[in-house]
Image (cartoon, helix red, strand yellow):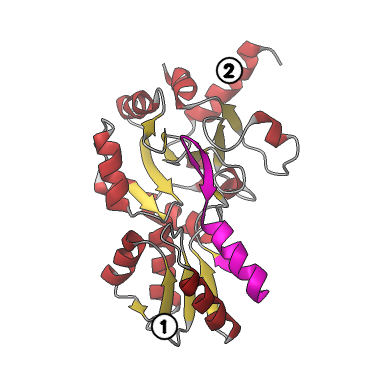
């Protein structure tokens, strides 16, 4: 298929999209650096009256933090446009485990989200252990989490990401912390961020769009792109973060479309 035919096919697919769900880390920015063309892409969607929301797995912060971060980068994000894995697991705890006692490994932002949602947080004898992307991780808390899980507490992970992309490379993420706990206890967690069905259902309910009307854009095969496995979502891989072209050769997960960045994707809406 020649270049013009490839572009035409991509435009046909993109033309049917009514709502874009955009990842943040490695897609809109890397660490504190805005990626070239990201804001221009958002402005293009606005101009074309195409809906979009952000969804980040990164539970080291909360929605308010990310709204402020993007604002300082030069774009005003509406409060209801920021979705995060924190909210997905909180909704599950509220609906499926009301009143359960929770031991949490997480930063102050995740802790605040749990407290504001009236989740019953405890330091001893929990029913549930929840592990987020805890950049304040302390060995004592990991040890307690393992003890509680061995004693029968349910083990939940906020999201499965092994690494978080930064300007200087990668740092261990929630999935890596959970893997350490699994290595010690022999028990694996149930996850709630991308690519789980928990997140898919959360997005569908929040946006009101059908699967085939939504495109998920992100830089990770096993979270962003895997969210489209077995359903009608369009998945768009950008090569501005964790995944590189060579990774596709050894992956069972493949996107609908691939672009170098949001800047390249924007050209298809000109």
Q: Can you say which quadrant of the picture contains the N terminus?
A: top right
Local packing at callout 1 (Cα closer than 10 Å; few below 14, some 14-19, many 20+) is some
Please state if 90 lies on the left or on the right of 225 as rendered: left
Local SS, label 2: helix
Residue 239 coordinates in the image, percent (x, y): 56, 30
Residue 222 falls within the magenta-colored stretch: no
Q: Specify the quadrant of the image occupied by residue 146.
A: bottom right
Q: Is residue 185 above or below residue 263?
A: below
Query: Rounded to the nearest whole Å, what is the CA distance between mark 1 and mark 2?
Result: 51 Å
Numbered mark located on residue 220 in the image: none
**How many numbered markers are drawn?**
2
Q: Is residue 231 above or below residue 1?
A: below
Local SS, label 1: loop
Local packing at callout 2 (Cα closer than 10 Å; few below 14, some 14-19, many 20+) is few
Residue 255 coordinates in the image, percent (x, y): 62, 37
Q: Which residues are magenta?
A: 164-190
Residue 109 coordinates in the image, percent (x, y): 32, 59
Query: Which mark is first along the chain, 2 or 1?
Result: 2
Numbered mark located on residue 100 in the image: 1
Q: Specify the quadrant of the image occupied by residue 189.
A: bottom right
- The residue under the point 38% across, 74% down is 94
- From where the camera sits, is residue 124 visible? yes
- The residue under the point 66% across, 68% down is 183
- The residue under the point 55% across, 29% down is 13
Q: Can you say which quadrant of the picture contains the C terminus?
A: top left
Numbered mark located on residue 7 in the image: 2
Residue 182 falls within the magenta-colored stretch: yes
- The residue under the point 59% across, 46% down is 228
């Amino acid at each position: 298929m020649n270049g013009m035919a490839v572009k035409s096919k991509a435009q046909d697919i993109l033309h049917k999209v009514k709502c874009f769900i955009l990842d943040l880390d490695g897609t809109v920015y890397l660490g504190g650096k805005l990626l070239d063309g990201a804001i221009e892409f958002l402005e293009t969607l606005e101009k074309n009256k195409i809906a979009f929301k952000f969804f980040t797995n990164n539970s080291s912060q909360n929605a308010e933090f990310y709204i402020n971060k993007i604002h300082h980068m030069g774009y005003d994000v509406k409060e209801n446009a920021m979705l995060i894995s924190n909210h997905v697991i909180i909704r599950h705890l509220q609906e499926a485990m009301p009143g359960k006692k929770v031991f949490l490994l997480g930063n102050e932002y995740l802790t605040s989200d749990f407290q504001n949602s009236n989740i019953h947080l405890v330091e001893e004898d929990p029913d549930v252990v929840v592990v987020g992307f805890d950049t304040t991780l302390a060995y004592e808390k990991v040890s307690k989490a393992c003890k509680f899980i061995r004693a029968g507490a349910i083990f939940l992970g906020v999201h499965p990401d092994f690494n978080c992309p930064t300007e200087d490379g990668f740092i261990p993420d929630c999935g890596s912390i959970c893997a350490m706990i699994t290595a010690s206890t022999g028990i694996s967690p149930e996850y709630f961020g991308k690519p789980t069905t928990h997140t898919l259902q959360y997005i569908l309910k929040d946006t009101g769009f059908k699967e085939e009307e939504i495109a998920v854009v992100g830089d990770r095969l096993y979270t962003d792109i895997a969210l489209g496995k077995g359903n009608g979502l369009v998945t768009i891989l950008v090569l501005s973060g964790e995944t590189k072209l060579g990774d596709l050769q050894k992956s069972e997960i493949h996107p609908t479309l691939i672009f170098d960045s949001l800047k390249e994707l924007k050209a298809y809406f000109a």
